[in-house]
Image: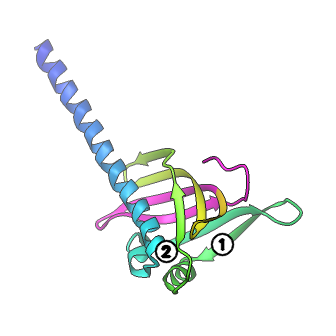
Amino acid sequence: MKKLLIINLLLIISTSIFAQQTETAAIKQTVNTLFDAMRKGDSTLLRSVFSKDMVLQSVSNDKEGKAILSTEKADDFVKAIGTPHTAVYDERIVFDAIKIDGDLASVWAPYKFYLGDKFNHCGVDVFQLMKTAGGWKVIYIVDTRRKDNCIL
């Protein structure tokens, strides 16, 4: 009886770990698709990973060094990505932390952003995602932006 209980407990734990790894991989795929869409300039691909009410914000510093919060409409962002441009928008991230609670996930990812091969700025992206019938969708992005003291 004791062996059966231990085996059942191990099965439950391994199933839970496998499910968490599968969800983590799906979340990473959603975020990677977002950046693939940016590199390709593909607004349709970009929109495929956004929820319809997605919010974008950035924390940066004004000329006096004070923190400011900027909000961008998702449609404006999608339009900017899909509008032909000469330099590739190449945001290179590292997945630092992914937290999941049911249908909500949070991703912390330091990044460097390049226009073509030229470094433009760096910071940290924070993504909030929601699991839907169509998979994980980005519901919120907030980032920091600076030119130096990059984490990567």
**Badge 2 density bin: few <14, some 14–19, many ≥20, Cα 10 Å:** few
Q: Is disc 1 surrounded by few (<14), some (14 to 19) or many (20+) residues within 10 Å?
A: few
**Residue at figure coordinates x 56%, y 77% from the top left:** 87
Residue at the disc numbered 1 = 71
**In this rendering, is residue 33 above or below 100?**
below
Give the main secondary structure of the magenta stretch: strand
On the question of residue 51 being in view, the answer is no
Q: Amino acid at mark 1?
A: Thr
Provide the residue span drawn in magenta: 123-152
Picture layout, residue 134 above or below residue 152: below
| Numbered circles on residues, count | 2
| Residue 23 drawn at (x, y percent) | 33, 50
Q: Earlier in the sequence, mark 1 or mark 2?
A: 2
Q: Secondary structure at mark 2?
A: strand
The front one of 39 and 29 is 39
x, y percentage for residue 6? 18, 19
Quadrant in the picture for residue 15: top left
| Residue 119 horizontal/vertical position (percent) | 64, 63
Q: Can the viewer see residue 140?
A: yes
Q: Measuring 42% from the left and 76% from the top, which residue is drawn there?
A: 47
Residue located farthest toward the front when viewing the structure as drawn: 117
69 over 93 or under it: above or below: below
Which image quarter: residue 16?
Answer: top left
Left or right of 85? Residue 22 is left
Per the image, the residue denoted by label 2 is 53
Amino acid marked by disc 2: Asp
Left or right? Give the position of 65 relative to 37. Answer: right
Compute the Cα span from label 1 to label 2: 13 Å
- Classify mark 1: helix, strand or loop: strand
Seen in the picture, residue 12 relative to 123 is either above or below; the reply is above
| Front of the two marks 1 and 2 | 1
Q: Is residue 23 magenta?
A: no
